Amino acid sequence: MSDVHINAAGVHLDGLVRRFGDVAALNGLDLVIQPGELIALLGPSGCGKTTALRVLAGFEHPDEGRVMVAGKDITGRPPNKRDMGMVFQAFSLFPNLTAADNVAFGLRVRGGATVVRRTRALELLELVGLGGTGNRYPHQLSGGQQQRVALARALAIEPRVLLLDEPLSALDAQVRGQLRDEIRRLQQRLGITTLFVTHDQAEALSIADRVGVMRAGNLEQIATPDELYHRPATTFVAEFVGTMNRLPATVRDASTVEVLGLARPLYGGTDDGAVLTGKAVTALVRPESITVVADEEGPALVTVRTFHGANTRLSVRMPDGQEVIADLPSPLASGLNPGTVVKVGLSEGPVLIG
Amino acid sequence: MKKPTGWWRWVRWVILGVVGIYFVVPMLASIWFTVQDSGHSGISFSAYAAIPGTEGFSTAIVLSLELAALTVVGTLAVTIPAMLAITLRLPRLRPWVEFLSLLPLAIPPIALVAGVRDLLQLGPDQLAGTPIGDALVSSQDPSLPWVLVVVYIVLALPFAYRSIDAGLRAIDVRTLVEAARGLGASWPTVIGRVLLPNLRSAVLGAAFLTIGLVLGEFTISSILLFETLPVWLVKISGENASESVAVSIASLLFTWALLLLVSLADRRRRTPRLEALA
């Protein structure tokens, strides 16, 4: 079986501005995607992530800025001249065509013998795990199968860039996980430059080489998933990605902060620490950094216990009434039921303040 | 849905029966009138056999069919691009276009044709010798009166609009267009290979409604003095009643046959949806 030949291209979204009336959906967005890289754009509704993808695809025209692909300015090119494959959130297969004909559509537009197109389409359906379904119509396929066909259709034209606009959001959880892994496997195998838009944090963190968190039309931070999660650049990123406890704290000196009665290194340890010495601040602490052990002297009380299989999430009420969220490996949470008096601690490691 | 029980089960059949009788009895009476062999017992299809040879029939039916075909083409050529433009680019205009599409229903045909006739009169009067004047005169050629095509397109708009609108609402037009454009398709390819095939039911429905309207329209064609099929029918009804009724029954059967063809052409093979793993 001949493989898909991808000539991956780098992408540069240079200072993009796109307004809808008084609202700036994109506000000077600057984003570089390296050839063969998968970037996930993450953010709340209305942050501009889909608008950014649509500008790259050519379905929206920016008011300012440029779209560069492989060093060339393609800002003014129509979508059918951009050599990009796209998978949409909504099921987008052409209802009047079979799965194989859908996959072959882009090839047919470009010309070529029918036999060659048909062979290619069947190869791509094999690639996405749908060998044998070429003669089915979209209404005869499940949602996951339809998105696989859509992926094969996007890859058939050997695009320089692959665009995925929340392709998994309409699928159930199990199917979503399977297809997500499939997309990542194919993307890495083919080395295709990919922009993946999603509102699902777990999806973004698990699939991407780098994740860009967007807010109000611009990037708050773009970094590897690990860096984004453990070293968020702003309070917004810290609170948007994953769960975050907001705990009262006091800055002891330029490099130390006191949280839950414990001294911990101040994340960053910058001049801000010196400025804030002695002042009350808010510490941003991940649930997995909180420790909880049963202790009759307390002073805290477990209020909610939620079992998540390998992990258990506890909600613990502190003496001042604050609720703290803690994620523990389930064996460690054994016996920590609602009503249990516990002692709350903090793992070693720097603490972020916001 | 819960099945009706008790007396309601019988009441609905009674209602259906009464309605059926209301529609079927006049039709059966008409058919009986046309096949009754007057002066002899038994039935005769002579009224139907005489239709092709009746003076003016072939001219009238050919004219009506030509007008129907041209009106269908013209109506779809106007409606489909306009509605695609509204759906994809100008959704704010939709309420206005919907309002305009309903106007032909609100204007009585007699008022419409009065205005058309005054306009046509400008041709040989104030606009004589000008290109517009000549066009107005030539549009009234009895062999193919284009003025009727234009008027019928206006009359057909409400029906065509609703049919095409229903078809467009049943598919995700924007996503399909963007998917096709992203794959490299030009606009003609998008419309010809993606949209129209998925609007087949709607287009056929609009075409059928237009054909039915044209074949049955009498007021405008008679006042403008064009001998279409309905006008010819009224003309011979005074001379040969059974033959005129036979033509009416035949045109009704033709319309039903057309509807059946439309339904058969639109029917898709449906197979049970397969249980499948992603």
Image: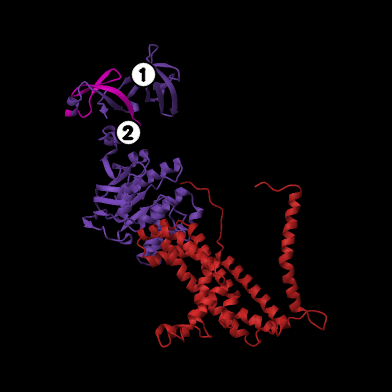
Q: x%, y% of residue A153?
A: 39, 56
- Residue A45's quadrant in the figure? top left
**Viewer-nearest residue: A158 or B226:** B226
Say how many tags the image has: 2
Q: Is residue A179 magenta?
A: no
- Residue A159's quadrant in the figure? bottom left
Q: Is residue B267 visible?
A: yes
Residue B218, compared with residue A94, is above or below; it is below
B214 displayed left or right of A92: right
Q: x%, y% of residue A70?
A: 23, 55
Q: Residues within 10 Å of mark 2 (few under 14, many from 20)?
A: some
Q: Is residue A244 magenta?
A: yes
Pair 2/1: label in front? 1
B77 displayed left or right of B5: left
Q: Is residue B198 visible?
A: no
Specify the amino acid type for callout 2.
Answer: Glu
Q: Which mark is residue A320?
A: 1
* Chain A colour in the picture: purple
Disc 2 versus disc 1: distance between alpha carbons?
Answer: 22 Å
Is the same chain shared between marks 2 and 1? yes
Q: Which mark is residue A87?
A: none
**Viewer-nearest residue: A60 or B97:** B97
* Magenta region: A242-271
Identify the chain drawn in red. B
Q: x%, y% of residue A294?
A: 39, 16
* Disc 2 target residue: A239
> Is the C-beta separation of discs 2 and 1 under 8 Å?
no
Q: Chain of mark 2?
A: A
Q: x%, y% of residue A220?
A: 27, 40
Q: Chain of mark 1?
A: A
